[in-house]
Amino acid sequence: MEELIQKAKEILSRARGITVLTGAGISAESGIPTFRGEDGLWKKYNPEDIDTADGFRRNPKYVWEWYYGLRELISKKEPNPGHYALVMLEKIKPYFTLITQNIDDLHRTAGNANIIELHGNIWWMRCMDCSYIEENREVPLAEIPPTCKNCSGLLRPVVVWFRDNIPLSTIDACLLSIEDSDVMLIVGTSGIVEPAASMGLIAKHVGKTVIEINLEESINSPKYDLVLLGKTGDILPKIIPINK
């Protein structure tokens, strides 16, 4: 492992542009449960009831009670060494983009700035009627379900639900960041959920070096240049180059 860590550090040291893709693994090390996996949230709840527009229309109070519980849990968690290592990487590299599948906002809390939130952000709400959008970090929420200040319509979390479309502008921004990078770093993601799952393969296709850090190999691990198995909070701080 030490040899792999040193090799990854050398690759990052030479790179001017780096795109990072993070998934639930890095947040799990801060105590935030994953949605999939052995103890994932979808093992306990039916996603059709929680994470679809139809489910929300049927019972917005139930959906918001679930999301309020998740907001309350997240509000008590802190970024871990893996998050802070990515902040340092952004500081020392001329070109850096962080694409995250996580909705908890811990990367921004840690100090990262150039972030693409692929699946949205749990601390933002959007009106189902007039599309008014606001940031709201109230814990507890003033009302469940919350309503729009403009039209009194129902507010929903600004997260990507099943059958929601990720905006093309967001996908384009991800692809442009990969094109402008020398290296793609894939951190704590299973490589199952699209479009994130294909981004490492796209990076390889256009000639980028791809490094994966995860607890276990993903389905795409054999196609990447370097795979480091272990906790992101242990490995990331060790591979951040000290030189610019």
Image (cartoon, helix red, strand yellow):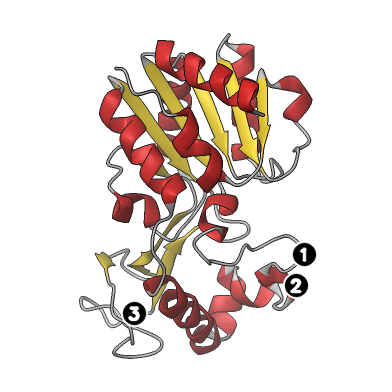
Residue type at mark 3? Gly
Q: Is 123 positioned to the left or the right of 220 in the image?
A: left
The one nearer the camera, 55 or 71, is 71
Q: Secondary structure at mark 1?
A: loop
Q: Which residue is mark 1?
A: 38
Look at label 2 and name its amino acid.
Answer: Lys
Q: Position of residue 41 (x, y in %)?
A: 66, 71
Q: Is residue 136 visible?
A: yes
Seen at 39% across and 38% down, the residue is 86
- Locate residue 179 relative to residue 1 in the image: left or right: left
Residue sitting at x 65%, y 37%: 197
Amino acid at the residue labelled 1: Glu
Q: Mark 2 or mark 3, which is nearer to you? A: 2
Mark 3 or 1, nearer chain start: 1
Residue on which the image places disc 3: 153
The reply to whether discs 1 and 2 touch (Cβ–Cβ < 8 Å) is: yes
